[in-house]
Structures are given as structure tokens and as C-alpha cells.
Image: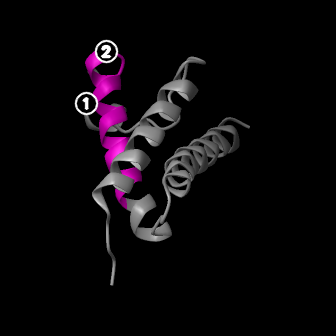
Amino acid sequence: MFKIDISYYLICFVAAFALYFKLHEKGNPPVRVVAHINPAWADSGWGRFFEAIIFALLGAILGTLLTSPNTPAQAVAAGLGWTGLLSSASSAGEEASNG
């Protein structure tokens, strides 16, 4: 039913990981997961790195399962799309709770 080609999975992982750090460059991470698990660790460098790894692993799995990329370009789009979708959903949720 679901078939994951490891090379496309890795491309999707790298794309999600890269965009996560590009969006994090502006100050706030796209999604804060570690802060809910261990608030003291959330702002450390290792905490942010661990969060990016978890985020990219999950995004690569979902991206390759849901889109079934057949080319490297499709795998990159799946990884970037996952990160962009969650970052926009996260920022919209924060604006609604602050507004």
C-alpha cells in the first residue's frame, strides 16, 4: 500500500530540516514541541537541534507516505511543504490565542 523509497525519504528529510532552520533564523521556531516536554531544555542549542530532528523525521515520513514522490523534486517539495504547512498553522494558532 505505502512504499517508501529511502533516497526520496532522505531528500524529503533534508528539505524539511533545512527549511526548519531557515524559518527558525527569524527568532521563533516554526513549531515548539520540546517546550511541552521539557521547558528548561527548549531554549538550549541541543533542545532546538533535537526538535528539528524530530520534526524533520516526522515530516519526511508523512511527506513520503502521503505524496509518494517519484522524482527528487517531488521529494523536496514534500519536505518543504510539510515544514511550511505546520509553520503557518502554528503561527496562525499563536496569533489567534494572542489576539
Disc 2, SS: loop
Quadrant showing the N terminus: bottom left
Left or right placement of residue 58 versus residue 92 in this view: left
Q: Quadrant of residue 32 in the image? A: top left
Is residue 91 shown above or below 45?
below
The answer to whether residue 69 is seen in the rendering is yes
| Residue ID for mark 2 | 44
- Circle 1: residue type: Asn
Q: Nearer the viewer, mark 2 or mark 1?
A: 2
**Residue drawn at 49 percent across, 52 percent down:** 72
Quadrant showing the C terminus: top right
Disc 1, SS: loop
Question: Mainly helix, strand or loop, the magenta region?
Answer: helix
| Residue ID for mark 1 | 38
**Residue drawn at 32 percent across, 47 percent down:** 57
The mark found on residue 46 in the picture is none
Residue 63 % position (x, y): 45, 59
Q: Write the start and end of the magenta stretch as one range.
A: 42-61
Q: In front here: 80 or 83?
A: 80
**Residue drawn at 48 percent across, 64 percent down:** 69
Q: In front here: 51 or 8?
A: 8
Is residue 66 shown above or below 23?
below
For disc 1, the neighbor class at 10 Å (few under 14, some 14 to 19, many from 20) is few
Residue 3 % position (x, y): 32, 73
Left or right placement of residue 57 versus residue 59 in this view: left
- Circle 2: residue type: Ser
> Earlier along the polypeptide chain: callout 2 or callout 1?
1
User: Residue pushed farthest front?
Assistant: 71
